[in-house]
Amino acid sequence: MSAPARRRARRDRRDRRRAATEIRRLPWRTVRNPHPPARVLAEDQIEAIHEASLRVLRDIGMKVLSPKARALYAGAGASADEDTAMVRFDPAMIEEHMAKAPSSCTIKARNPAKSLEFGGNIINFGLVGGPSFVSDLDRGRRAGDYEDFRNFMKLAHSFDIFHIGGAAPLAPLDLPAPTRHLDMYYAAITLHDKIWGASLLGGYRAHDAVEMACIAHGVTRDALPVQPIVSGGINTNSPRQLDANMSDGMIELASVGQPVIVTPFTLLGAMAPTTIAGALVLQNAEALAGMVLCQIVRPGTPVCYGGFTSNVDMKSGAPAFGTPEYAKATQAGAQLARRYRVPFRASSTNASNAVDAQAAYESEMSLWASVMAHTNIVNHAGGWLEGGLTASYEKLVIDAEMCQLLAEYLAPVTVDDDTLAVDAIAEVQPGGHFFGASHTLERYEDVFYQPIVSDWRNFETWHDAGAHAADRRANAIWKKLLEEYEAPPLDPGVDEALREYVVKRKRAIEAGEVELEQ
């Protein structure tokens, strides 16, 4: 072999080794489901749930703890009892205000290429949100802190399959509760360039999200109704209660036309009836009440119908996720959202306490149900563990694999003269193989999906390399991604303005100059 040929051979071997250690990830893309949405209920059954929900709102009502929200409802024609805080709604009022909600909306990201549309057959995956604990194979389960929080923001930036960067994958419990949302927003804005969510646990937290989003985008509050730049979600306190903090956060965000996601937390047997139909009636009534409040505040505010109906283990009372009941309730919830012509939000969930087979198959069950329902926002699709109490590093990586697999499955199959491959079939003799066919050689490097976590080597090669299971492989992957992480560019002036805002607001909150809702 000549010297140039030897150099080329060495270079080829080096490139192959580098490719073998590369973490293959799908590039940013809009994920659409081209198939008809799954329907578990007939149209007359959907109407029966709708009518029953209206009866609940008219005859039984919602307890609304915020005086501000009760006044808004009353001003729009609802019956509000100040002594009991109960609000009852005329069905015509519900229909009138829901007709004002748009069928879709676009939220602008700091990187315009990563702006998102909520609606239609578009599916957006988001990180886990809300846990107080975090876990990995090295340090185990522990209270979340700001370092872990920042790491999850960096991993959100590293995986383009997660369209929603989020702002609360875990609670940084080492930071003071009244002001930690400011540090969380700052990390979300600076460590990834995707859309993120406001905390709606009170009006002042929502206010800070709007102000910091305006700084990041270089706009004023007056411009926001035209172009949403931040969203937020609330949970109703099922059954039939809307807490003051959640109401006031919704009102603040809706006042400037930013999208609000309303998600009842209806667990069959605990916070809802044991029947799926009964739980859906309760979910639907609560979701309608929340979305209507947003339309009262500002007609045309984008809203999203959230479904989080699962069941409990009747032996222990513990929540169960990824169940058949969850899958059917999710797909029925999406049907209800389409009935009101608003986007739908669901989740990828599991009840496992470890990154094991249970965590994977329960997540896949809920993820598949969400995708086939045409869910527009799939929350908790990266890192959810232990029924939502823990954010897991390894689970985030495995979840990224599952989301990528589904995204590739949803990509349309191309059928044309080239892919029909008649010439390739003619090239290979009977009993031969296609490894050396020109059709194969032209495509072999990227023709098939390349996994993040899956190991397709034979047993001997896998065993000799350490016999690592999926969770151990995921452990190495998230560490490598954090080592390679590079922050997205940010104008130094914007960064300085964000820092100044955080310092200013912390001082005001700590000095008691900001009213903190209870």
Image (tube, rainbow, N blue to C red):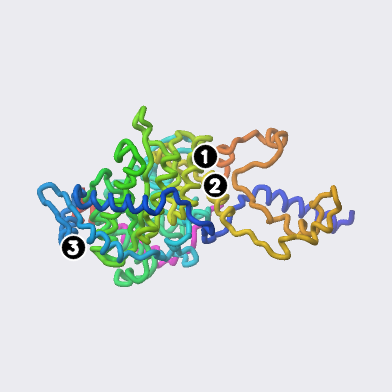
Q: Residue 170 at what x, y percent from top left?
A: 39, 45
Question: Where does the magenta region start and end?
Answer: 484-503
Q: Earlier in the sequence, mark 3 or mark 1?
A: 3
- Assign a secondary structure to mark 1: helix
Query: In the orientation shown, which residue stands out farthest toward the right?
Result: 1
What is the three-letter code of the residue carrying label 1? Ala
Q: Quadrant of residue 423?
A: bottom right
> Circle 2: is it few (<14), some (14-19), or many (20+) Cα within 10 Å?
many
Label 3 residue SS: loop
Sequence-earlier tag: 1 or 2: 1
Q: Nearer the viewer, residue 41 or 469?
A: 41
Q: Nearer the viewer, residue 156 or 92?
A: 92
The residue at which mark 2 appears reads as 402
| Residue 177 part of the magenta-drawn span | no
| Measured Cα–Cα span from mark 3 to mark 1 | 46 Å
* Residue 230 image label: none
Identify the element where label 2 is drawn.
Answer: helix
* Residue type indicated by callout 3: Ala
Front tag of 3 and 1: 3
Q: Position of residue 28 (x, y in %)?
A: 54, 60
Q: What amino acid does circle 2 point to?
A: Met
- Of the numbered discs in the image, which one, if any, rests on residue 76? 3
| Res. 360 mark | 1
Distance between the Cα atoms at labels 1 and 2?
Answer: 9 Å
Tags 1 and 2 in contact by the CB under 8 Å rule?
yes
